[in-house]
Image (spheres, rainbow, N blue to C red):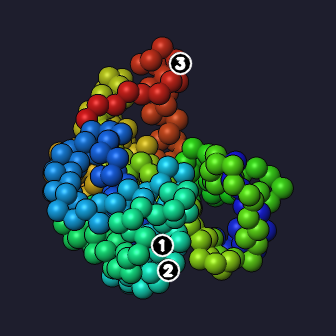
Amino acid sequence: MGWWQVNADTLAGSRFVLSPLAETFACLKMLHAGTATHPGERGWLGVHLPAYRKRLAADPVTALLVRCGLGQAWIADFLTPTPYGDETFEAEVARVREASPQEARAHLARSVGGPLPAGLADRDDLPGRAAALLTALWEESVRPDWERRRRVLEADVVARTAQLSQGGWAAALDGLRPGTRWLGGNRLQVNLHEYPPREISGAQLVFVPVTPKAGWVSWEESRRYAVVYPCTGALADVRAEAVPESLGALLGTARAGVLVLLDSPLSTSQLVAVTGQGLGSVGRHLRVLLDARLVERRRAGRSVLYSRTAAGEVLVTAQRDGRTGGTGGPVTYRS
């Protein structure tokens, strides 16, 4: 397994950041695989996959670059510069474009695990081609929906921060993605691959959520490291759950539906989108739930996010357990 040695100062200074480029690259990985993990992704692929395949069919060099760069166990490093946080997409993708041709070819060779195919071996335009593809994907397929995606990512950060405050870093890290967990002894397992451990004490460490079900790690020499992980925001997998009858009788079906949806923090606009209720109705439901201390609110960036309090969690869990015969098992959602 791959793990990093992390000292207390590095962990104490680590933080969650958002990255438009990481979100775009995660979408590239999904397009390359051509498979979805939930109905929301299937809908997005249905819209954007045909144009993506048409683009690569017309540009075989870039198509070969993508196939080599997204290796089975190793992504070509120059494609995933480590996020700094608070950067625009343009600033991030400039670091892809500015990679040296020699560096890009070396990273691609490592990704494929051997010599590069003849179509890439002598080319000096690979960083520019990669940046152009990522820019086109951002402009056409990610940027039009970035505000919604950003709200989902901010909601995930709020949820992780709550985990951190309740259970410490071990609790927050264990649920990031499969293969990531706190091992103890200053060791952070970052994946299940058999890579040598890395000493990152003293470096900057950031955690970066993305909405597709994707994840990877990156680093910038020995100064900055990143763990990219799939977020758990509700709109990443648009879900609808039947409200327990007893909870609906207690609070009213519409208001109970708002409370049930707050498994992870959501903004008012997100709740409007998910429930189909009007802004005024959602606002009134939230006010009643706030007054009853069943939900709380906190600011994340430009959004105000709502989440269940401990009392609200007990109420919803009790009703779910009663509906499922007390098993407390997972609820099945549908799109």
Q: Marks 3 and 2: CB-CB under 8 Å? A: no
Q: Is residue 196 visible?
A: yes
Helix or strand or loop: what does disc 3 sit on? loop
Type of amino acid under label 1: Arg
Q: Secondary structure at mark 2?
A: helix
Q: Which residue is mark 3?
A: 327
Residue at numbered disc 2 = 102
Q: Is residue 228 visible?
A: no
Residue, disc 1? 105
Q: Earlier in the sequence, mark 3 or mark 1?
A: 1
- Which residue does the image show at 31% across and 74% down from the upper left? 129
Give the residue type at disc 2.
Gln
**Residue 161: quadrant of the picture:** bottom right
Indicate which label's residue lies in the foreground, 3 or 1.
1
Helix, strand or loop at label 1? It is helix
**Residue furthest top in the image:** 325
Q: Position of residue 27 (x, y in %)?
A: 33, 57
In front: 315, or 275?
275
Q: Nearer the viewer, residue 243 or 196?
A: 196
Q: Of the residues under marks 3 and 2, which one precedes in the sequence?
A: 2
At a point 32% along the width and 23% down the height, the residue shown is 245
Residue at 38% from the left image edge and 27% from the top image edge: 332
Q: Nearer the viewer, residue 24 or 308?
A: 24
Quadrant location, the C terminus: top left
Q: CA distance from mark 2 to mark 1?
A: 5 Å
Residue 311, image x, y percentages: 52, 41
Hey, what amino acid is under mark 3? Thr
